[in-house]
Image (cartoon, helix red, strand yellow):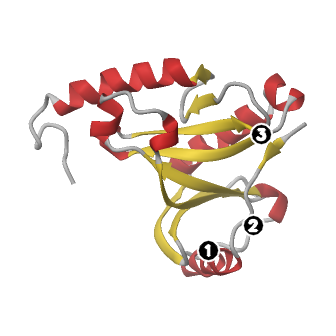
Amino acid sequence: MALILAGAPAGTFSAYAIALQDFGLPEPPQDATFFLPVRSLCLEELAMAAPLSDAIPAGARFVASWPNGSVASCEMNGDELRSIVQGDDARILLNAMHLVLSLDAVRQRDYEVYLLSMPGAQREALCLVPVQGGSTLIAPVGEADILTEATFIQQNAAIARRRLSLTCSERVCS
């Protein structure tokens, strides 16, 4: 059993490799690169405790490491680079990937993985969706907990409601 990672479309991978070069980074080893489809839920959906199945496709993210310890995360919109982050901020996502790869549940059944972005709540999570029945597992990025979908939705609905109660300038609207 395993974590099933989506393959990056050829054009997206090429754009990623060019972006790395633009920032002076060599192409990382293939076995040290993760490609994650990104899905997104807005603050209002979170506040209403929307199920994760309501999340919409929102690009992709590569996270990679090099033998010298460097780490980078590249957010892609199709074949275009949206952003690149290096160092500790990228390492947080890489650590989350290593956490889910080490889970007993992943050794016992197949899961597909995607990155859930919740920009209004300024949070991200890895979502592990079982290929054949069972419960979705959630690994909030930057945390050591593995949550059920119900617990995750409940926690984030409360966060979203608090954020929506703030004025736009208080919640750093974009």
Which comes sooner in the sequence, label 2 or label 3? 2
Amino acid carrying label 3: it is Val
Q: Secondary structure at mark 3?
A: loop
User: Mark 2 = which residue?
Assistant: 28
In the rendered image, the vertical position of residue 19 relative to residue 110, given as above or below: below
Q: Is residue 98 visible?
A: yes
Amino acid carrying label 1: it is Tyr
Q: CA distance from mark 1 to mark 2?
A: 11 Å
- Mark 1 touching mark 2, by CB under 8 A? no
Q: Residue at x 55, y 81 (%)?
A: 22
User: Mark 3 = which residue?
Assistant: 131
Which comes sooner in the sequence, label 1 or label 2? 1
Query: Of residues 55 and 121, which is closer to you in this image?
Result: 55
Amino acid carrying label 2: it is Pro
Q: Secondary structure at mark 2?
A: loop
Mark 3 closeness class: few <14, some 14–19, many ≥20 residues within 10 Å: few
Q: Secondary structure at mark 1?
A: helix
Which comes sooner in the sequence, label 1 or label 3? 1
Q: Residue at x 13, y 31 (%)?
A: 166
User: Mark 1 = which residue?
Assistant: 16
Q: Residue 15, percent across and down?
A: 60, 80
Q: Residue at x 59, y 44 (%)?
A: 93
Q: Residue 137, percent across and down?
A: 65, 28
